[in-house]
Amino acid sequence: MKIAGPRDFDPDALKAKYVSERDKRVVAGGNGQYVPVEGRFANFDKDPWVDPDFARAPIAEHSQVIVAGGGFGGLLAGARLREAGCTDIRIIENGGDFGGTWYWNRYPGAMCDIEAHIYLPLIEELNYPPKHRYSYAPEMLNVSQRIGRHYGLYDKACFQTTITAARWLDAEARWLVETDRGDRLTADILVLACGRQSLPKLPGIPGIETFKGHAFHSSRWDYAYTGGDFHGGLTGLRDKRVAVIGTGASAVQLVPELAKFARELIVLQRTPSSVGVRDNRETPPDYVDMSVPGWQRARRYNFQSLISGIRQDRDEVSDGWTALTEAITPPKAAEVAKRLGREPTVDELKYLAEIYDYDVMNRLRGRVDEVVGDAATAEALKPWYRWFCKRPCFHDDYLGTFNLPHVRLVDTGGGGVERVTADGVVANGQEYGADCLIFATGFEAGITYTRLTGFEIHGREGLALSEHWRSGVRTLHGLTTDRFPNCFFVGGNQQSTAAVNAVHLLDEQGEHVSYIVKEMGRRGISQVEPSPEAVDAYVDLIRTSPTNAQLVDFYQDCTPGYYNAEGKAKKGEEIFFGGRYGDGPIPFFRMLQAWREKGALEGLVGADGEAVGNGRIGFISSIIS
Ligand code: NDP
């Protein structure tokens, strides 16, 4: 096919290589190859940042709003609700403070590879200029705490508290939330902001519990053992052989830091990550003009538009994400048609997309050769799959770390670590001794909503959410479901959208929820839920979106990972980004905005099942004080 012009590689050979690398990695168990950190592995879930003996008396109190989860999603919902006039908000959080992902993940080197100015929530409102182009974990935790203080969210927060059940009380028309501390908390509104990937997982390989050394998960870093803190000083590792299992985004960040202190470092790789240039640096005061109102929103839209292939006059963020997205995006069909003098076929367009992807991946593989001295190690570090098959990574020190004499890459050729012994790990049939084993093996994915929350949610007449969604998720806009009044889902759950900058989505959701709650107050509505018809129509929109088939088509050829249910995904909703609003993040945000601007609360009904959007304005209810 002439469509792509001459290239200095053989696309057929590359395709064959991708397929063979993929086939090596598909394992029978799919997502089931992993085990959760509970039961005999519960020690891997221990919160390292709190006093385990913390105790308090049970609370029995009413609030306007209860938010389940104190990560960025819960904080944004809480802040936006405060701005909308809610003063009585109780956030309930498993951890000992706000921060969510950045409360838990404090491993050395932890940072976010999405630009800080668009990632950090509410920094325009806080007038907080990020210190670096990409924020490090302590700053993200600090910003979380600032939000908590600024919006008064600490006042009623319950930390180190796990919700055990949430139940809509029909007679009282309010939510009852019970916790492991014996609390009985009620609220008019329940916001579920329980994250997306918050449950650490381990590989389901034999022997983990037989290991005689010290082992922990990357998201529960044990500084008591390693010594030091986020900023370094891991002197406890000076005389240790450290083994890291996993080479995903967490490992890419922590491996260079471990290498500074460990006597010996072994990195056990199943599949290499793609690692682009990060180019982190301190941000001078004029890095972004933060004086223009709405600057953060505009910058987020600019970034997400470019990532979605929507042309912009300027690339505000101008980093690896936007550069590689541009490089990987083939010309649009109309341009191709002009060049060919005829309409291209679907297969031709697919082929063109593959060629652009090969170009980008060749460049990333070339980077490995440029940085890594040993040819065999370099070869093993090259990713053989399309760019978005796995979470792209960006780092400036990861690849170079493998040039250090005390750092060794153990490439398992897709087979993975086979087992753990008392003295180390076995891979490729060989035992590697280790004193310390770090599982950078990620978080549960492809799980049900109530597995993620960890508790059942009962709507009207005791209906359990797990039952209600037994045959599939049912929502309006990914935010509400029928028969669950005054209940809002915030986060990357299905039927919303997948934004590369996840905080962009959380903020849009927070804004939407606060709009609805504010309108409830303004219109004197005490109860809202979507009508079954509105939910059916929205579910239908999601199910029939052609994006689902396109995602399956793309991801079925990908190397396994949590994006494609470890190579097992057959349906759109089994893909990590699937079962969502088909047109992508920007149209999704615009759709929500248009819905709000219409002011009809379309699809929402009250306790009587009647639409709530018309009339009734003027009565100020107790929801807004
Ligand atoms: P991942 O799920 O991305 O990676 C898990 C790693 O463990 C993979 O390399 C996997 O290999 C490996 N693994 C699993 N089982 C075995 C085995 N038996 N032997 C050897 N290796 C094994 O988890 P992460 O914690 O790295 O990242 C999770 C997500 O968190 C990221 O995808 C990203 O979305 C987010 N994140 C974001 C960051 C940011 O900067 N914004 C930073 C860090 C994380 P294989 O690939 O073969 O499955």
Image: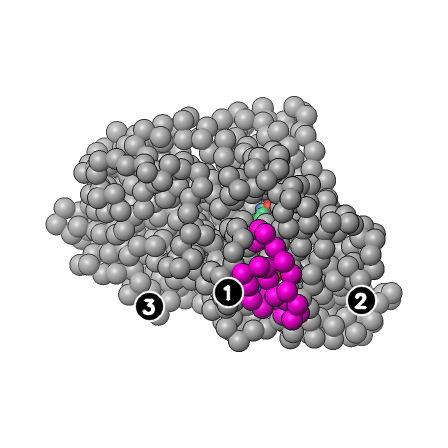
Determine whether 472 is above or below 129 in the image: below
**Kind of residue at disc 3:** Arg
Q: Which residue lies at the image location 54% right of the left edge and 61% below the top edge? A: 422
Percent coordinates x, y for residue 508 in the rendering: 46, 43
Mark 2: secondary structure? helix
Is residue 424 found inside the magenta-colored segment of the image?
yes
Residue 4, numbered circle: 2
345 or 305, nearer to the observer:
305
Tag 1 residue: 207
The N terminus: image quadrant: bottom right
580 or 61, nearer to the observer:
61
Q: Which residue lies at the image location 74% right of the left edge and 75% below the top edge? A: 16
Tag 3 residue: 470
Is residue 25 found inside the magenta-colored segment of the image?
no
Mark 3: secondary structure? loop
Of circles 3 and 2, the one toward us is 3
